[in-house]
Image (spheres, rainbow, N blue to C red):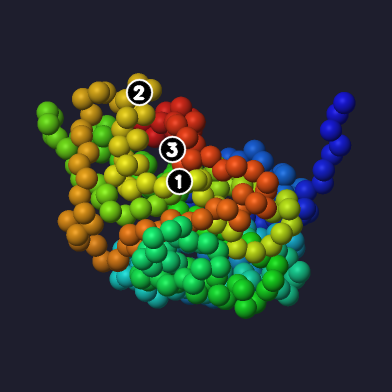
Amino acid sequence: MVAAYKAPPHKRAVIIGNTGQLGLSLKFSKSLYSICRYFNFFITSHIDPHENFRAVKSYLTAYKPDLVINTIAYTSVDAAEEDKLISYHINSVFPKILAEWCLKNDATLVHFSTDYVFDGRSNKPYKEEDSPNPINQYGYDKLTAELYIEQMTNNFYIFRTSALYSPFRVNFLKKIFHKLSHPKAKGGYSFNVVNDQITIPTSCDFLLEHMYKIISTKANGIYHVVPSNYCSWYEFARLIRSEAIRKGFLSSSAPMISPVKSTRFKSAAKRPLFSVLDNSKMAKALGIEIPSWDEIFRENCNEIFPLIL
């Protein structure tokens, strides 16, 4: 018996951004049609904060979407400390403008946020209702965007996530794999990774899969979209190395990885030490059990590693 067709919750979507991790992941996603019948991408290079994002607003008005998905962000955490104005315009002002447009045009806004809205001083995973307290400019600007959106409209989804990885653009997985596959020296070369910053590695595919499911429920709000359990960046790096060797994408003589404290690295921005998000709201809303981050990573290895060689 053929299952009955279920119409997607939205007719027409505009996806803002086509060159970042999320934009590219959406571009190659096979499940976008589960949330909309038609979609178009607004090209990243056409976004100009100096003109108050007029091109975006004109495009939205012409295309008339009932769903706007914003993938644009200034994600360089250290650079945001130096380029505060740029970070504020991209990470705070732009989402506000999108929220204003969505309110006036009866559209739903999808916005992606970060674990860095929290200070990392907790000893347990953060829930959606916990009070944010960012400790760097990037986190502050992303929180400001959340507040702008909540003030402007009730018709939104804010998906907080952490430690995104994919075959696209710059991310921790690709940096570590490159260090392992292109060592600076032969022989006993090794490199350091921090072991006192705790997070949840999240694949873009996982984020989008669960975004689609949540949007299909039509239950607006803030959600923490991450796998279960957590690890240090060092533990994630170790798993990248061991899985790449096990699956034949790296030599067993690949560089070793050593754990160090964050104080060994000089950086412009402070990082929270325990920026772990609680995913129980998402699990309850979808009626599912969320697999562990390492289980998801192992499942995705065969698809990701060949694309980043």
In the image: residue 97, left or right of residue 194? right
* Measured Cα–Cα span from mark 2 to mark 3: 15 Å
Q: Which residue is mark 3?
A: 294
Q: Which residue is mark 2?
A: 246
Residue 115 sits in which quadrant? Answer: bottom left
Q: Amino acid at mark 2?
A: Arg
Q: Are marks 2 and 1 in contact (CB under 8 Å)?
A: no
Establish if 193 lies above or below 98.
above
In the image: residue 204, left or right of residue 215? left
Residue 174 sits in which quadrant? Answer: top left
Establish if 153 lies above or below 110.
below
Q: Nearer the viewer, residue 234 or 303?
A: 234
Q: Which residue is mark 1?
A: 229
Q: State which mark lies toward you, 1 or 3.
A: 1
Q: Are marks 1 and 3 in contact (CB under 8 Å)?
A: yes
* Measured Cα–Cα span from mark 2 to mark 1: 23 Å
Is label 3 in a helix, a strand or a loop? helix
Give the residue drawn at x 23%, y 57%: 262
Q: Is residue 94 visible?
A: no
Give the residue drawn at x 42%, y 72%: 133
Q: Nearer the viewer, residue 112 or 229?
A: 229
